[in-house]
Image (cartoon, rainbow, N blue to C red):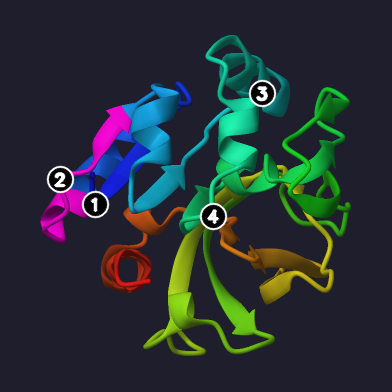
């Protein structure tokens, strides 16, 4: 049984995420094999690009039901978090349907879209993934679509209005930012995930 498996979703951040985990002592495999993913202690679902393309890749690899049926901790990253929702307005895309709600284009507030750069998160409820993360710790965001704050929101980010930065529903966790690009605080979050 692998300690961690990164789902091969075709995103450009696969290598940087794998290197970030290796620095923490976890030699995570990158796989699109449903049995290998199901057998891992922890699973990561990264994503970069458009929701429709990412869902098409997961469907073509027969991974949609496999992901939905996972019982071990899964961490969705950036687009990977958005795919956990029921629907994305980006390309009018049906997503995995694990988390209720709809991902929408970031509201216009006179700020550049995409949100690209460093921002802080506000923890709304206690979450082991955020253990040791301070209120002034910055994470790196790159996204044009986001989920509104909902009962599954663990932490929010303010970008003209509050948006979901971290979600949790049962064993499914998602972060809108890129921990693999977020320096020491991102490493801390990934280490917390490996210890769940």
Q: Nearer the viewer, mark 2 or mark 1?
A: 1
C-alpha span from label 3 to label 2: 26 Å
Residue name at image x 62 percent, y 85 percent: 123
Q: Secondary structure at mark 4?
A: strand
The residue that mark 4 highlights is 141
Asked if residue 8 can be seen in this view, the reply is: no
C-alpha span from label 4 to label 2: 25 Å
Pointer 2 with pointer 1, Cβ within 8 A:
yes
Q: Nearer the viewer, mark 4 or mark 3?
A: 3
Picture quadrant where residue 18 is located: top left
C-alpha span from label 4 to label 1: 27 Å
Crowd class of label 1 (few under 14; some 14 to 19; many from 20; radius 10 Å): some
The residue that mark 3 highlights is 55
Crowd class of label 4 (few under 14; some 14 to 19; many from 20; radius 10 Å): many
| Residue 24 is covered by the magenta coloring | yes
Horizontal relation, residue 75 to residue 166: left or right:
left
Relative height, residue 109 to residue 8 (above, below): below
In the image, the segment drawn in magenta is 21-30
Asked if residue 145 can be seen in this view, the reply is: yes
Quarter of the image with the N terminus in it:
top left
The residue that mark 2 highlights is 27
Specify which label sits upstream in the sequence, 4 or 2: 2
Specify which label sits upstream in the sequence, 2 or 1: 1
Relative height, residue 158 to residue 140 (above, below): below
Q: Nearer the viewer, mark 4 or mark 1?
A: 1
């Amino acid at each position: 049984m692998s300690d961690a498996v990164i789902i091969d979703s075709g995103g450009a951040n696969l290598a940087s995420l794998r290197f970030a985990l290796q620095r923490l002592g976890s030699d995570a495999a990158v796989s699109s094999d449903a049995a290998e993913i199901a057998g891992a202690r922890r699973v990561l679902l990264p994503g970069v690009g458009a929701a429709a393309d990412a869902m098409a890749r997961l469907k073509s690899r027969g991974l949609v039901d496999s992901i939905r049926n996972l019982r071990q901790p899964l961490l969705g990253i950036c687009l990977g978090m958005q795919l956990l929702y029921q629907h994305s307005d980006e390309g009018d895309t049906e997503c995995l349907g694990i988390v209720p709600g709809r991902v929408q284009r970031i509201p216009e507030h006179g700020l550049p879209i995409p949100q690209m750069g460093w921002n802080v998160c506000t923890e709304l409820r206690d979450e082991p993934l955020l253990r040791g993360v301070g209120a002034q710790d910055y994470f790196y965001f790159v996204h044009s679509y986001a989920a509104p704050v909902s009962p599954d929101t663990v932490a929010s980010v303010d970008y003209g209005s509050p948006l979901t930065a971290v979600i949790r529903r049962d064993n499914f966790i998602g972060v809108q930012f890129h921990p693999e690009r977020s320096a020491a605080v991102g490493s801390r979050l990934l280490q917390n995930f490996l210890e769940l």
